[in-house]
Image (cartoon, rainbow, N blue to C red):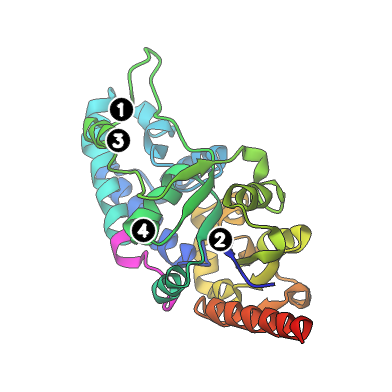
Amino acid sequence: MPVRLVVTDMDNTLYSWVDYIVPAVEAMVDAVCRATGFPKIKVVQSLKQVYSRYESNEYPFALQESSLFSEFPDFASFDKLVIDPARAAFSQARRKYLRPYKGVVPALEGLKERGIPVVALTDAPRNPAEYRAKRMGLDRLLTALYTLPGFHFPSGSEGEKLVAPDILRREERGDYRASCPVVELPREYEKPNPAGMLQVCRESGVAPAETLVIGDSLRKDVGVARAVGAIDCWAEYGTYVSIEYRERLDIISAISVTRRHAASVYEADKAERDTATHALSSFAQVLEVVEESARASRKVAATRGS
Ligand SMILES: [Mg+2]
């Protein structure tokens, strides 16, 4: 059957999550150490605790929710002295290292030209997933973005918002919103639960059998694709993480968090690779699989017609 819908994972499929999160969190930790004089181990431990609670090391309000904040008299001074430089350091690293893999943008444009919608389905929380799509301009190439639930703004014991005023203003202005529709799925829809994929197919009006699924995790992405009867493509290129980066990631990120974003980092059993129908060395190869299935279905139609 021809492909009429592409469902893509995001982290380590459209861009390297690992290559950006490692230097970005490290830069943030260094900035906090410089601002507070606290030892690195204290800062890392404290942040990791919050990250584990939210199962994400992109929880944007980790500092004010960490034990570090309790050592400051009020939010305004903590915001100015600690959070500001930390945010700046994180953003600078993100600007530098967060970019789509080579071939992703032309392939997404190619799919758009062919009239094939592309929907992103990620286990990341809404806010960072949406913001990343927007930053890289992927939102204009996606038909929709399906995420797990987003974060709310933290507040203090008196109910006051523990968020810098400029963030509140930007949120109100919609500066963090992507240009494509964004759907928040329930937390328990995390892959390999096929419920999210089935919802995407249903809302796109395309049967799973006519859907191509691409992702770097054999267990999550390939697993879900096979469970619903879609065409599975394993983004093998997204699983190549150097030992050095893996070690640096383990220092700043709890295993449960890494697993949520980049499950393939811990999928050591490459014997499972045989479960994938297509193993891709670049996202651009999605176009080849699309062409191949179009050719195959034309052939079937011709045979039937003769
Ligand atoms: Mg992934």
Q: Looking at mark 3, is its residue's CB closer than 8 Å to ligand 1?
A: no
Q: Secondary structure at mark 3?
A: helix
Whichever of labels 2 and 3 marks the residue nearer the N terminus, that label is: 2
Asked if 186 appears above or below 157 in the picture, the reply is: below
Give the label on residue 171, or none: 3
For marks 1 and 4, give the CA distance.
Answer: 42 Å
Whichever of labels 1 and 4 marks the residue nearer the N terminus, that label is: 1
The picture places residue 306, in percent across and down from the top left corner, at 77, 87
Residue receiving disc 4? 140
Whichever of labels 4 and 3 marks the residue nearer the N terminus, that label is: 4
Q: Nearer the viewer, residue 98 or 48?
A: 98
Marks 2 & 3, CB-CB < 8 Å contact? no
The picture places residue 195, in percent across and down from the top left corner, at 70, 46
Residue range in magenta is 94-103
Q: Nearer the viewer, residue 270 or 101?
A: 101
Seen at 76% across and 62% down, the residue is: 229
Residue receiving disc 1? 72
